[in-house]
Amino acid sequence: MVSTTLLFNARQYLQDVVGTEAISAIPDKLWPITHQLPLFLQNLYKFYETSLLGHRCLLMLSISQEGVPPAVVRKHWQEVHKYYQGEIIYIAETVISYNRKRLIQQRVPFIIPGNQLYIPMLGIDLREHFKSARQIERAFLGSATQAILIREILHRNCSGLAAKELASVMGYSPMTITRTINELTHWKLAEITKLGREKHLYFPFSGKELWQVALPLLKSPVTKRILVSLPDESRNEIQNNNFLTGESALAKNTSLADTGTPQWAITAKKWSSLAERDNIHVLKIDSSDAIAHHSMDERVIALEVWAYNPNTIALGSSSVDPVSLYLSFEKNQDDRVRIACEDLLKQTWSTLK
């Protein structure tokens, strides 16, 4: 997934810098001779061939998100040269300033999409703003933007809409929609076409491909997890008007065993209203151990407060959407859960086809 996003960003960056005509289309399939390379190179990089300013080039995309010492990159670059006679360009998501200087000293051509471009044999040396790895990690889409993107992935009914139509579909204000459109176009996840006086949003990718490109910018929709004890009427109200989430939803859609304590997704507005009631008792906040401890108590349910309304994206009437559900487990290291999450995604892509 990382290499797919990096390839897309590199393609866009090259087109922005040297022009669409100066670069040939970069194929989505790997360089055919990749399998002849030593295994350690196949495990560390993805290779794609293209033409840049009339020169044959091989793009050497780093799979690892950890910094690789420039001297090591140089050795790998030289090894690939035994199999490729054209120019080889190293591409990574981030390179700290110190290592950038060392790469230049090593005369290794490199591209950091959106930030740096150094290809001396073509006379290109573009030095821009350098983002630290920490800044990259903090770059996420806003909650409304993520909601729109996931709705497009699953329902495919946002692309082509005018801004006011999108606001109506998602239940957001025009100001919020303007901000989401700016985010989507900034990250090159969508484009804007003007028809008359109206701006229409278009997604160049769809389904699984859009998911892969956007994944580094997505985060868990869950802002808070709360374990509560409620009387029957309040508990029934939640069950009848909200969606299963967490391991309850995962168990419903995969082979994962259920926890026994139902888990429900609600909006922050609903939680604020619920928290004001006298008959609610908060037991523990954000604790999976607490959920297991109270699994036999029918009065206890777990609530997840979501950053966006699950109702606008859900595919069915009982569980939250599978993409958001997958993201909600981003920090869960339980092997059973991780396997179930991957199974959930496979089912989703199969259904979308």
Image (cartoon, grey):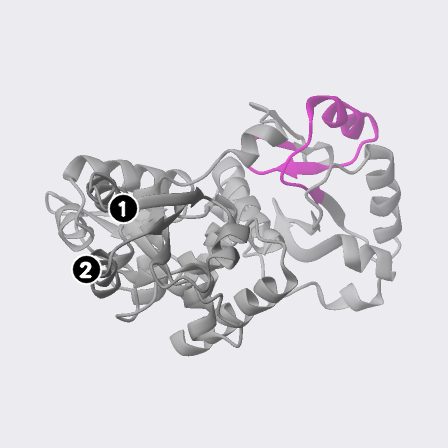
Please say if 346 is above or below 144.
below
Looking at the image, which is closer to me, 7 or 266?
266
Residue 46, position in %: x, y? 70, 56
Task: Say few, some or many: other residues with alpha carbon within 10 Å of mark 1 (under 14 / 14 to 19 / 20 or more).
Answer: some
Left or right, 142 with respect to 101, comes to left
Residue 337, position in %: x, y? 57, 63
Instruction: Tell me which amino acid carries mark 1.
Output: Ile
Tag 1 secondary structure:
loop
* Residue 307 showing in the rendered view: no
Instruction: Tell me which amino acid carries mark 2.
Output: Glu
Span colored in magenta? 90-117
Total labels: the figure holds 2
Looking at the image, which is closer to me, 260 or 296?
296
Tag 2 secondary structure:
helix
Residue 296, position in %: x, y? 45, 65
Looking at the image, which is closer to me, 300 or 302?
300
* Residue 186 showing in the rendered view: yes
Task: Say few, some or many: other residues with alpha carbon within 10 Å of mark 2 (under 14 / 14 to 19 / 20 or more).
Answer: few
Q: Which residue is mark 2?
A: 233
**Residue sitting at 53 percent across and 65 percent down?**
341
Q: Which residue is mark 1?
A: 280
- Is 161 contained in the magenta span? no
